[in-house]
Image: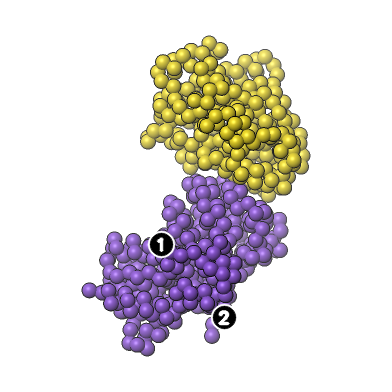
Amino acid sequence: MADKIATREAYGNALAELGDKYDFVVLDADLAAATKTGVFKKKFPERFFDCGIAEGNMMSVAAGLAAAGKVVFASSFAMFAAGRAYEQVRNCIGYPHLNVKVGATHAGITVGEDGATHQCLEDFALMRAIPGMTVINPADAVEARAAVEAAINFVGPVYMRFGRYAVPVINDKENYKFEIGKGVNMVDGKDVTFVATGMLVSMAMDAAKVLANEGISARVINIATIKPIDKDIILDAARSTGAIVAAEEHSIIGGLGSAVSEVVCEGCPVPVVRLGIEDKFGHSGKVPPLLEMYGLTVENLVAKAKAAIALKK
Amino acid sequence: MEQEKLNRLKQTAAQIRLDILEEVHAASSGHPGGSLSIADIITYLYFEEMNVDPANPKMDGRDRFVLSKGHTAPALYAALAEKGFFSRDELKKLRQVDSFLQGHPDMKGTPGVDMSTGSLGLGFSAACGMALAAKIDGKDYRTYTIVGDGESEEGQIWEAAMFASHYKLDNLCVIFDWNGLQIDGPVAEVMNPTPHDSKLEAFGFHVISIDGHDFDAIEAAFAEAKTVKGKPTAIIAKTVKGKGVSFMENQVGWHGSAPNDEQYAQAVAEIKATM
């Protein structure tokens, strides 16, 4: 059984670790304990600035800091970073293409008990529609740490999504190389491809094992960079497996499923079945029953794979 | 101030007013009223107050300016052109597809623009970020921002005020352009955000109220702001919307409409008569 670590933990630890190596500042909006930027704050108090519960102001302040030459991480829950402060992220950070890294934690349904008002299921849709915005959603703690360093070294705005819920570590810390815009083949297969992001990657790997037992060969691709998306790896999967399941902890509208559909429709039309939150708001609850309730399960991945294969001509 | 300096500033401000009129007339679009109301303040900022270099718009350590009320970009562009950041010929191309002079300021495209603004309520916060950056880096440059009176109905203006005070941004000077009018009518009738002086004092600002068309008062206010330590300064500048053009003054209709040829000729004649 693999270790389980929430990507927000890896985010906070990465900031604190990389603070020695790189010169950047971190902003938060009264959620440092939850977003884990508090780990950085403890080590580098002079480079941490709490903005209070005023996320719009925080994003615009981040833009001003970046315009004056700073590398800035601005953190809050995804609901407030991508939702509340959407326009500030678009107009102050996106339009002038400033060097701000939005660290959005507590994304998706796995926020759990806090319920629908805090479960942001639309952030990929919002953020990837902003011209020039890079959108990253790490699948595990290893990838989250690597993505933070990649974002520091990348000049321009980046939206990074992290989760509250502990998820399996699927990448090898010693050998893992993260490259913005590159998908990774996690499992090879020829009958169908899971194009997954975030916690759905490890679930898709489990689903591939179930399918293998039934004689179905499923490929699993980890798409950590939602934008710019790795068209080559997706089109190769479309050509060689002929059916795709896009899987994400996000609304089926506007997120990875939409992005994959766009790539496949324009480059190599084959069936694409989307697995995500089905145009609904979230709900309070413990994470495992919530995942069941919203269909983010290995069983549903298996069913969607079969549905995609059935749609092949 | 000395008469010669005053005359020079008045001449520059008049030229900036002519430029504003030329821009919006050529574009048949834009916001003359609020551009004319800040013409004197922006003249003082660019020709007396701020340390900027037209030959090196991104100069390290330069003073920063954020036009939070970004729709009055014609005034900023006029000041930048007169200062030499780009050719005056560009002003005729305001809001055209072949120009870098966007309807609202674009820091990526226009030399001398420090922050992209225009969506109201955001620029003040960005100015706070710049002022904080100076503090972090131990640099002594100052950051200036002009906020509209109507703009101060945006909640984020008060988030920014809270932030500026909390982080003791005494290197930040916010100017409220109090021309009293917004698109839907008098600010006091649309949604009254007053009193600004006591509100800003309550937020922890050093507040100075002036006539925004009096260069002596403008100079004194900026000088006073530099002496204030441990808190940001707000200058509440009482101005006249459409200042300098008789038929535009205090007329809400000139917030966002351009003069026709006849009106333009009259406006130019009125400004030139003062030069």
Residue depth check, mark 2 versus mark 1: number of the one nearer the observer: 1
- Relative height, residue A210 to residue B189 (above, below): below
Chain letter of the yellow region: B
Tell me if A255 is positioned left or right of B9 in this view: left
The amino acid sitting under disc 2 is: Asp
User: Which residue appears farthest toward the bottom when viewing the image?
Assistant: A213
Label 2, on which residue? A3
Q: Tag 1's secondary structure?
A: loop
The amino acid sitting under disc 1 is: Ile
Foreground residue, A257 or A225?
A: A257
Chain letter of the purple region: A
Label 1, on which residue? A253
Label located before the other in sequence (2 or 1): 2
**Image mark count:** 2
Give me the chain letter of mark 2.
Answer: A
Residue plotted at (28% across, 69% down): A270
The quadrant the N terminus of chain B occupies is top right
